[in-house]
């Protein structure tokens, strides 16, 4: 089956370069990459063109008007419309996947199931070194063992340790059949602050149509490159307040979504 991997991207070309390197090393090869840019940086098309000449996998690029606030969900919907895979896997633009990342989703995904993993939080010094060397060689358990990296246990590859859960998905490392996202009208574009609309809201709406959640946190490994926190507790609380209203109204098929 074909995977469309949607990378939410905003200005960090150094990280995107590393992600492309990691995509080239994927053991599962039937995929396309969609760079979902919540911006309209004039450098991005040239960067994509340069990398498309290097790599054999298909790279698509979608963008929108720049700096009009947080509109990640709108870009995710545009990317869903452009996708051609039966399976959608989501990755943030500061997270570098393990070589068996896509294979993990192929091994575990089934209808009416969303799979998700977690992130290894690479420390600041190692992130700086990784950017300077432009190499992903250290992004593994042994390479990070004596650094200040946190959540290092999620760099251990134990594919037999899977677990069915009722909650807990993360939008930076998740995969599901595209048809299930269509059933709930994609992402709710009413959310214009980070931290809820990309995953927590999606979780309850998928639950409403019978989708179960499977943790593959020791198989779908990814390495989050260090940066300063880019959203606040206030932003999360705003999103949670919206979520409460939508739950009370049972709006699992969002009104302002993939199809208006």
Image (cartoon, rainbow, N blue to C red):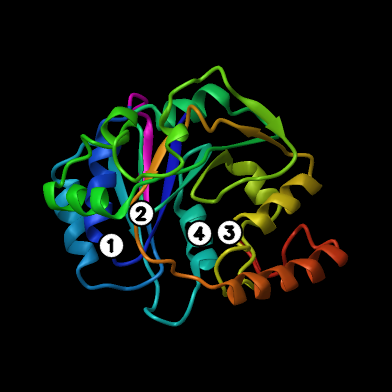
- Tell me the mark number nearer the camera, choosing from 4 and 2: 2
> What is the span of residues highlighted in magenta in the rendered image?
27-34
Disc 2 versus disc 3: distance between alpha carbons? 16 Å
The residue beneath circle 2 is 94
- Tell me the mark number nearer the camera, choosing from 4 and 1: 1
The residue beneath circle 1 is 12
Residue 132, label in figure: none
**Residue drawn at point x = 52 percent, y = 22 percent:** 107
The disc, 4 or 3, on the residue closer to the chain's N-terminal end is 4
Disc 1 versus disc 3: distance between alpha carbons? 19 Å
- Tell me the mark number nearer the camera, choosing from 2 and 3: 2
The disc, 4 or 2, on the residue closer to the chain's N-terminal end is 4
Q: Given contact means CB atoms under 8 Å apart, are the residues at marks 2 and 3 in contact?
A: no
Disc 4 versus disc 1: distance between alpha carbons? 18 Å
Crowd rating for badge 1 (residues with CA inside 10 Å; few <14, some 14–19, many 20+): few
Task: Quadrant for residue 3, please give it.
Answer: top left
**Kind of element beneath mark 1:** loop
**Kind of element beneath mark 3:** loop
Q: Position of residue 15 (x, y in %)?
A: 27, 54
Give the side of residue 33 with respect to residue 84, left or right: left
Q: Given contact means CB atoms under 8 Å apart, are the residues at marks 1 and 2 in contact?
A: yes
Crowd rating for badge 2 (residues with CA inside 10 Å; few <14, some 14–19, many 20+): many
Q: Is residue 248 above or below residue 165?
A: below
Q: Given contact means CB atoms under 8 Å apart, are the residues at marks 4 and 3 in contact?
A: yes
Crowd rating for badge 4 (residues with CA inside 10 Å; few <14, some 14–19, many 20+): many
Residue 198, label in figure: 3
The residue beneath circle 4 is 76
Q: Given contact means CB atoms under 8 Å apart, are the residues at marks 4 and 1 in contact?
A: no
Q: Quarter of the image containing the C terminus? A: bottom right
Q: Position of residue 103 (x, y in %)?
A: 43, 26
């Amino acid at each position: 089956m074909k995977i469309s991997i949607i990378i939410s991207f905003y200005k960090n070309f150094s990280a995107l370069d590393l992600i492309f390197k990691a995509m080239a090393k994927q053991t599962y090869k039937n995929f396309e990459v969609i760079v979902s840019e919540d911006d309209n940086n004039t450098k991005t098309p040239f960067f994509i063109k340069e990398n498309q000449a290097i790599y054999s996998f298909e790279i698509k690029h979608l963008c929108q008007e720049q700096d009009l606030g947080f509109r990640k969900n709108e870009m995710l919907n545009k990317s869903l419309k452009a996708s051609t895979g039966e399976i959608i896997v989501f990755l943030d633009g500061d997270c570098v996947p393990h070589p068996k990342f896509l294979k993990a989703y192929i091994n575990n995904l089934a209808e009416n199931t969303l799979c998700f993993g977690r992130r290894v939080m690479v420390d600041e010094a190692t992130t700086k070194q990784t950017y300077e060397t432009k190499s992903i060689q250290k992004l593994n358990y042994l390479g990070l063992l004596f650094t200040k990296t946190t959540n290092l246990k999620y760099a251990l590859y134990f594919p037999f340790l899977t677990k069915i859960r009722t909650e807990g998905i993360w939008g930076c490392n998740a995969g599901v059949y595209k048809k299930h996202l269509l059933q709930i009208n994609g992402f709710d574009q009413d959310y214009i602050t980070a931290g809820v609309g990309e995953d927590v809201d999606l979780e309850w709406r998928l639950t409403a149509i019978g989708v179960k959640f499977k943790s593959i946190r020791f198989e779908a490994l990814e390495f989050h490159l260090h940066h300063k926190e880019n959203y606040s507790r206030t932003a999360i609380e705003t999103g949670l307040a919206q979520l409460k209203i939508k739950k009370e109204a049972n709006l699992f098929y969002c009104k302002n979504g993939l199809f208006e």
